[in-house]
Image: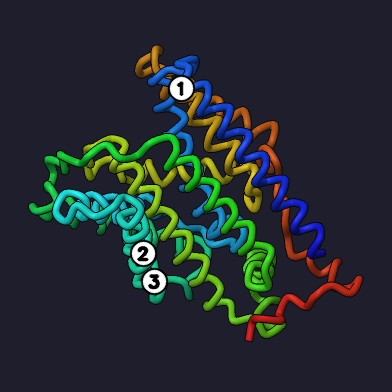
Amino acid sequence: MEKKYLKRTGIFLIASVVLFAILFGLMKADIIGRYYTQIIILMGINVILALGLNLILGFTGQLALGHAGFMSVGAYTAAMLTIKLHLPFLVVIILGGVMAGLFGLLIGIPTLRLKGDYLAITTLGFAQIIQVAITNIEPLGGARGLAGIPPKTTFVWTFFIVVAVIAIIYNIVNSSQGRAMISISEDEIASEAMGINTTKYKMMAFVIGSAFAGVAGALYAHYYMFLDPASFNFMKSVDIVAYVVLGGMGSIAGSVISASALTGILEALRPLGDFRMVIYPILLILIMRFRPQGLLGKSLGAKSLFKNKRKGGKNVTAESK
């Protein structure tokens, strides 16, 4: 198992370095122009958002509809730290993620005992509260938005943060904690009967996913250099959910491919003006009609884990007490 893990890690790192070298070389040679570089950066930001929500929705099975709210917390936190305190960009990104994670903790404590539709409605309500609060806080720019954010988000920053997020999610999912999260997604009642503290692991997934949304928000703020509270509305949360569902809930590669593809499709349809908002939903409907399980399906599940257990694998409750 250890050799297999090291082999996969090595392949992932080598592939990441090769991909970075190719893209960076093409950008330096101006084969990939500034416009397409910006699209690639936006793809990376959306990938981070999708991966964070996938941990909550795909791997843990909690329907959360307020991811854009945590993104806004990270975005405004990072922007204010840069504007007021002029902190290094890496510190700003980390603190943006930490602040979003703290909001996730505060919101998760009263809501994660709820299930299904109730959790979805509650998280959506909290996201709306965050948006309304930001709109009415004058030091944050209020309804006018926050301007004057320096352009610090680059392809290099975005690429390596995406790689780091993928590595972190992969290691979480393949740990004993991750197996506990997956078992909750498959059957929460059965997980509780096996001694898993379901609230603890739902909270863990929710906080980590929220923190990644904050990191994406920090990159977003320093990419657009302007923050509008309306950008973090309900439809933004729906877009992130679409990335996860279309890629395949519980699939890391699916989230990466789906977020990148949908971002590229939306940009490709931009010349069509308002018609793109008709064509884009039709494409989503067609994908879900002919591929309801998502592009890559669900790669992990409790059934496969329990199958491994019967063959002598580790008990999913090893770290759940």
Question: Which of pointers 3 and 2 lies earlier in the amino acid sequence?
Answer: 2
**Residue 68 percent coordinates (x, y):** 36, 50
Farthest residue to the left: give it. 138
**SS category of the residue bearing label 2:** helix
Question: Which of pointers 3 and 1 lies earlier in the amino acid sequence?
Answer: 1
User: From the viewer's perspective, is the residue at label 3 or at label 2 nearer?
Assistant: 2
**Kind of residue at badge 1:** Lys
Compared to residue 66, the image places residue 290 above or below, namely: above
**Residue 257 percent coordinates (x, y):** 60, 36
Residue bearing the label numbered 3: 105
Compared to residue 317, the image places residue 16 above or below, namely: above
**Residue occupying image coordinates x 64% and y 67%:** 178
User: From the viewer's perspective, is the residue at label 1 or at label 2 nearer?
Assistant: 1
**Kind of residue at badge 2:** Val
Rendered-image quadrant of the N terminus: bottom right
Alpha carbon separation for disc pair 1 and 2:
34 Å
Residue bearing the label numbered 1: 28
**Residue 180 percent coordinates (x, y):** 66, 72
Farthest residue to the top: give it. 271
**Kind of residue at badge 3:** Leu
